[in-house]
Each structure stands twice: as structure tokens, then as C-alpha cells.
Image (tube, rainbow, N blue to C red):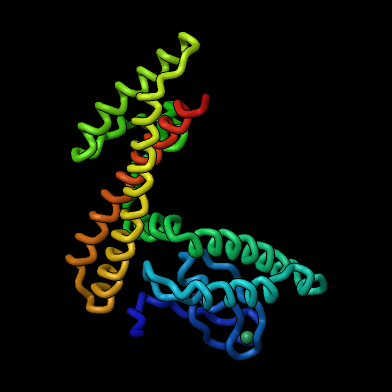
Amino acid sequence: MTIVAEPSKKIVCWSCGGDNDADTQFCANCGKLQPYTPTDYFAFFGLPRRFQLDTAALEKQFYRLSRKFHPDLYARASAEEQRWSLEKSSVLNDAWRTLRDPLARTEYMLGLAGIRLEVQSRDASDRAVENGTAKQQVVPPDLLEEVFELNMQLEEMRMAKASGSDDPETRGSLEAARQNFDAQLKASEQDLHRLWSEWDAAAEADDGSTQQAAQQRMVDLLNRRSYIRNLMRDVEAALKS
Ligand SMILES: [Zn+2]
């Protein structure tokens, strides 16, 4: 796999004066821990920025670095080295949690491309906190009819519950809707994997416009997923008796 060269700066080892790449964690010459420099999670792990990742290799690297950054190893080191080991341990944990999770990694990659996803929470207060400005959730056009129908069924269910009865027919429809949404989520995962490989291949080929098109489709896909998940939550709440 070719690794697209990102602009890399050099740093000089604080201990031996040797030259190192800016992302180096330990001096190539003397092995001393280097200062923490803010960097993206891929660079932190020494990985190319790709949607598809060798998670087994990532895990191995995570455990290796966890041991090497462990603050106990720096108990007798300088105050700076102690601080760097703490900073790096903390970034390592965040990076690991983000990169190992396929959806978190996707959102993170899109974030690196300057794309912020719509916050899809239905709770207005959550949304205000996360997004600054309340944004109306947009119904994906192909779901409009389904959502309209679903809202009527949810309302019928609420009315039935309020009057202390059950409505087996509506319950059946809601159960079918839940299964349908579940199937749509599973299908969208496969679509996402296809978009990942499209983007990664375009990155290898330095084809920016294909990358951008794939990114946009990922954004639409993730927004759609998030919309469906909210619908499912409503359906599941209504089905609980
Ligand atoms: Zn050194």
C-alpha cells in the first residue's frame, strides 16, 4: 500500500539532538519519549488516513504503545517526560476508541475533511448543546411516506394506551416497521463499506473528486441512518407496554 505523503515536519530530539519525524513518539536515535505534538489520530498511530483499517494491527499497536507510554515507566524521569507520557496515554485511549469503531472512525475521517454531521438528536436541549444552533431534522425524501404512515400508527398506539387498551393491529404494523428499519440499517452498513473502499482507492489514485463524491454519499448515508435510528427508538418506546 502506498502511503500518501502528508506534509511532515522534522523535530530535533530534546535529549540527543537527533532528527526525527514530527509524529515520532520515541527518538529513532536514543529511544527517548518525545514531546506530545497535537496530531490527528491516524498520524498518532503512524497509519495512513484511510476508512478501511487493519484493526488487528491497530489493536496490537495500541497495546504496544499503552505499555510504552505507561506513566509508571516515567516515575523517575523528568517532569516533562512524565507530563508527555500522561498526555500521550490519554490521546492514545481516545484515538483507539475512535479508530476501532467503524462509525466513529467514519465520522472522524469526515471531520478531518472538514465535514460536520448534522446532530440528529430529537431532544431540543441536546441539540442546542451539541450544535449551538437548533437544526431541524430533515426527513430523507424516500422515507417521507413511510414516516407519515408511521406517525399515524404511533399516534394510534398512544391513544390506545391512553385508554388503557391494546391495539393488536397497530402493534403488528409497528413491529413490521421496526423490522423493516432494522433491515435498512443492515443494508446501509454494506453500502458504507463500499463507499469506504471507493474513497480509499481514490485516495491511492489521488483522485480528489471521487473522494469528495464518496464523502458526500457517506454524509447522506449517516444522516439517513441516524434518522432511522431515531424512528426505531420511537417505535420501540411505543411497543413497550
Ligand atoms: Zn534522541
State the image coordinates of residue 216 (x, y, percent, origin top left): 24, 54
Picture residue at 37% right of the left edge, 34% below the top: 231
Left or right: 130 in relation to 76: left
Residue farthest to the bottom, as pictured: 29
State the image coordinates of residue 111 (x, y, percent, origin top left): 37, 55
Picture residue at 34% right of the left edge, 39% below the top: 227
Residue farthest to the front, as pictured: 168
Task: Please state which of residues 108 and 114 is positioned toward the viewer in this rendering.
Answer: 108
Left or right: 80 in relation to 187: right
Quadrant of ligand 1: it is: bottom right
Looking at the picture, does residue 93 appear above or below residue 27? above
State the image coordinates of residue 134 (x, y, percent, origin top left): 36, 29
Q: If the image is split into quadrants, where does the N terminus sit?
A: bottom left
Task: Please state which of residues 198 and 212 is positioned toward the viewer in this rendering.
Answer: 198
Picture mark count: 0
Which quarter of the picture shows residue 48? bottom left
Picture residue at 36% right of the left edge, 24% below the top: 170
Looking at the picture, does residue 162 appear above or below residue 35? above
State the image coordinates of residue 172 (x, y, percent, origin top left): 38, 30
